Every structure is written in structure tokens, then in C-alpha cells.
Amino acid sequence: MGCGHRSLSSPDVSAHTYGNREFQIAGRAVGPGHPCYVIAEAGSNHNRDLATALRLIDVAAEAGADAVKFQTYTAEGLYSRRTPDMRYLQDQGLVGNRESVWELIKRVEIPWEWHDDLAAHAAAAGITFFSTPFQEEAVDLLERIGVPAFKIASYEINHLPLIERAARTGKPLLISTGMASLGDIERALDTAAAAGAHDLLVMHCAVNYPPRFEDLNLRAIPTLQSAFQIPIGWSDHTPGHTADVVAVALGACAVEKHFTLSRNQAGPDHPFALEPDELAAMVKAIRETEASLGASVKRVTEAEAEMFRLGRRSLVASRDVAAGAALTREDLAIKRPGFGIPVHELDHVVGRHVARAVAQDEVLQWDDLVR
């Protein structure tokens, strides 16, 4: 598959299998047919306070998420000090007075010595811990503490040495694709596959904080499924959980969502993150969505069986009918319950003789008619 810069709707996309249709993260199956893998994204919402970071892990576990994820980087390894100011940070008042982007990142970077404590705390809480490495040294750190998977951020999809380093671990790679063309995604997957990665998941994403709903293009999820034949997920920065429910309905096998202890805190990722009760509500909504999707077969369900029998209509005697009489249309009413002769047989019943006397409101059965 080539690496040209085609749009997601391009008609010349050919299917290509980059990896397994399903795989496991810490023993949890991920892929079509399995429950959506829910990742609670703590990001930088720890505020460089270890107690807050540990509480975020507890909140994610209590909400029923499958994994809690942080971000591992240093300002020195992420941004040039000459990076221009970002308008959205200024417009939302997320940078301090005369604070540069580099200084902001330095203020919110996670201390690397925390990682062992975070992983141990997550294990005790019964939730999977991993992190997004933003530089090659971060891959080595996370591999040392034994994370079961790596997440590649949208901004890093062209950081091929990073992807290669993560792929060489043999762990599953989850690759976000905000701002990416189909060619960018192909190039990243080619790099990962060449480095030995077999368990790959692409996450559709719209990069903005928060994005507009009209910019989400969630119908790209089945397009990506068709193009790459691997599990597809959704990495979300919208408020609420509407988009997450829609993504799951469209086939997303994983959902990643930022969360915080409170949106009233200072920091770049707090304003669009879910608070603890909202995170729990999102997980619940995703599970309800999965349950409601059911099967593609249209049929009477077991839960509908009683109402099918009692709540639908069938043919009922509208008045007393003497034994041997021929039934007229006026002798017949269409009433509930539904365990009698079906209504669609009405024309085949009119003119038939009854084998016995039938009382008004009796539900007619085929045995009541003379053959």
C-alpha cells in the first residue's frame, strides 16, 4: 500500500491487513466483537502533584474504565524554545502572563520518577496503566516498568523513529490520527509493521481542544476499518459523551477520553475533560450502547415473547355464533390478545363454518373451524 496523501473518502483505497483483527492488552481482548476498550486519559491533569495523580487512577478504576493513561515527556524533548505561541492557549487563558509554550509544557510535564508509583497504584486498584511516550527515551522508561501497550499521540504520527522504537517492544500500539491524511496513517503503520508490531489499533481523532462536533467526521471510523482491516478506535476531546456513544455505534473498538478531578483547575487539559461522575456516566453509556446494538437479525426477542402473545391482535368472535354457522365479516373482531388466528388470515376465515358454538369475545383458533 502506497504512502500518497489521499483523503479518507478516496475511492482508490485498497484494503490491506497490517496486523491482527484482535489482540490483548493485559489479558483484555480488544477488537471487533469485544467490549469497547475504555481508556481514561489523565494526561497532564495531575498538576505535578503525586497525590492528585494517584487519585486520578482511583477515579478511573471506580468509573469502570479498562485503563488509565498518562503522558510521558519532557519540555526539552518535546518543544523548541523558539516555538511560537498557540492561539487557543492564549484565547482560553491557559498560559500565564508572558509564559511561552515551552514554559507551559515544563510546568505540566510528569516527573519521570513517578512512573513506578503510578504503575504500582494502578495494579493495586485493578486497572491497567500505560502512557503515551513523546520521545524515544520515554519508550525505554515505560518498557522498563512493564506497560502492556503504547499509545502514539496524533502529533507524533510523523515521528517515525518513536513509532519504530515502540514497535520493537512487541507491545500493542494504539496510534491516534488527528490532523493525519490516509498517507500519514499508512506510513506510520508501515513503520510499525516493519519494526515487528503485529497488534495495531488506529484511533480516529479530531485535534482541537475542544473540537466542534461538525468537525468530528465520525463516519471515518468505518472507512478506516475498511482501509486497514485492524481495530479502529476513537480519541475524543469533546465535552460530554455524545461523540463516544456514536463512535461505539459506528464500530469503535476503543475510546480514549480525558478526565480530571475538577474542570475548575488551571492547566491546558482541564477545561474539556470529564469530571469523575461524568467519566462513570460515559462508561455506563458505552456499555448500554454495546448492549443495545445487539445482532443484525430482525426477530422477536425473548424479552418480547409475552407481549407478542398477549399484546398483538388476532381474530375474536364479535358475537355469539351457533355451531355449524358460516362466519361473516360481522362475526369477527380484531382484538388483543394475539395467540389466536392471525389477522392476516382474515380473508381465509370469512365463509368458513365453525365446528362448535362460539361465544362472544372468544379468541378463535384454527381447530374451531371445519376443515
Image (tube, helix red, strand yellow):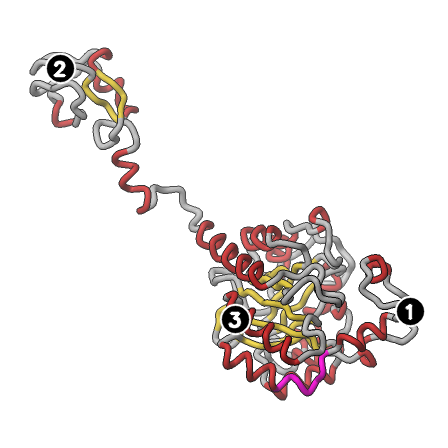
Identity, as a three-letter code, of the amino acid under mark 1 = Arg
Instruction: Indicate the quadrant where residue 257 lies.
Output: bottom right
| Three-letter amino acid code at the position of disc 3 | Ala
Disc tally is 3
| Residue 15 screen position, x and y as percent | 62, 58
Please say whether residue 198 is visible from this viewpoint: no
Of badges 3 and 2, the one in the foreground is 3
Please identify the residue farthest to the front as the structure is shown: 264
Magenta range: 110-116
Where does residue 240 sit, x and y in percent of width and height?
62, 54
Label 1, label 3: how many angstroms apart (C-alpha)?
Answer: 38 Å
The residue tagged 3 is 61
Q: Is residue 269 above or below residue 147?
A: above
Based on the picture, tell me whether residue 115 belongs to the magenta stretch: yes
Q: From the viewer's side, name the closer residue of 120 and 20.
A: 120
Above-or-below relation of 252 to 111: above
Instruction: Identify the residue under disc 2.
Output: 320
- Residue 228 at x, y percent in the picture: 62, 61
Residue position marked by numbered label 1 in the rendering: 98
Which label's residue is closer to the chain start, 2 or 1? 1
Pointer 1 with pointer 3, Cβ within 8 A: no
Helix, strand or loop at disc 3?
helix
Front one among 126 and 94 = 94
Q: Residue 244: image x %, image y %? A: 59, 55
The amino acid marked with disc number 2 is Asp
